[in-house]
């Protein structure tokens, strides 16, 4: 995956902001499968703020490494606002970072577990918490790339507008 110039600029901005505030970042990724972590680490300086990520593609990994409660997955589905939030909170705990970004969704081509292709949740956990739902169209790679770009843009916007 190659990042669009806009996303590269936003990752630079994120890194500079986190370095200035002496904060750290981790990720928990499902449908993006490490692409968000890769996007962040593709920009020089990431090693100062990015501690790591978990590619939690299966339910079992979400439960074991991110401590997402099985009952939450049973009740809400792996592709849900609540599970995205739990994944982000799990990354915060696992890596002991200031911030975490999580992605979960269905890349396609068809639905999965009753959830339509292109349904995506991105959660940010930390001093400011936010979750967004995306309804994306296109082939798998388009959905995955758009998710990464949206996660980066959302986190950059949070950092830009937070209160000091």
Image (spheres, grey):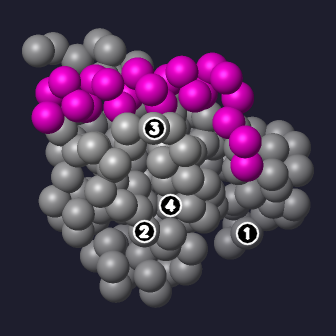
- Which sits earlier in the primary sequence, circle 1 or circle 4? 4
Q: Is residue 5 magenta?
A: yes
Give the residue at mark 1. 112
Q: Nearer the viewer, residue 124 or 4?
A: 4
Q: Residue at x 37, y 38 (%)?
A: 45
Q: Which of marks 3 and 1 is in front?
A: 3
Magenta stretch: give its range: 1-22
Q: Is residue 4 magenta?
A: yes
Distance Cα–Cα, label 3 vs label 1: 36 Å
Q: Where is residue 39 drawn, in percent x and y? A: 56, 45
Name the secondary structure under disc 1.
loop
Query: Can I make out residue 73 in this image?
Result: no
Query: Which numbered marker is on residue 29?
Result: 4
In the displayed structure, does residue 83 sit left or right of residue 6? left
By secondary structure, the bulk of the magenta-drawn segment is best described as: helix
Distance Cα–Cα, label 3 vs label 2: 21 Å
- Which sits earlier in the primary sequence, circle 4 or circle 2? 4
Distance Cα–Cα, label 4 vs label 2: 6 Å
In the displayed structure, does residue 68 sit left or right of residue 24? right
- Which sits earlier in the primary sequence, circle 3 or circle 2? 3
- Which sits earlier in the primary sequence, circle 1 or circle 2? 2
Give the residue at mark 3. 44
Name the secondary structure under disc 3.
loop
Q: Residue at x 58, y 28 (%)?
A: 8
Distance Cα–Cα, label 4 vs label 3: 21 Å
Name the secondary structure under disc 2.
strand
- Label 4 Cα neighbours within 10 Å, binned few <14 / some 14-19 / many ≥20: many
Image quarter of the C terminus: top left
Q: Where is residue 150 drawn, in percent x and y? A: 58, 33
């Amino acid at each position: 995956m190659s990042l669009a110039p806009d996303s590269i600029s936003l990752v630079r901005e994120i890194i500079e902001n986190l370095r200035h505030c002496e904060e750290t970042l981790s990720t928990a990724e499902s449908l993006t499968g490490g692409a968000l972590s890769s996007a962040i680490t593709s920009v020089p300086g990431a090693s100062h703020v990015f501690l790591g990520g978990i590619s939690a593609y299966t339910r079992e990994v979400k439960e074991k490494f991110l401590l997402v409660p099985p009952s939450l997955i049973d009740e809400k589905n792996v592709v849900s606002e609540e599970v995205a939030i739990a994944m982000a909170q799990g990354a915060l705990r696992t890596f002991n970072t200031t911030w975490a970004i999580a992605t979960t969704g269905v890349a396609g081509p068809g639905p999965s577990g009753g959830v339509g292709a292109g349904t995506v949740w991105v959660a940010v956990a930390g001093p400011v918490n936010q979750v967004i739902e995306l309804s994306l169209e296109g082939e798998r790679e388009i959905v995955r790339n758009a998710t990464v770009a949206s996660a980066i843009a959302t986190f950059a916007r949070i950092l830009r507008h937070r209160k000091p």
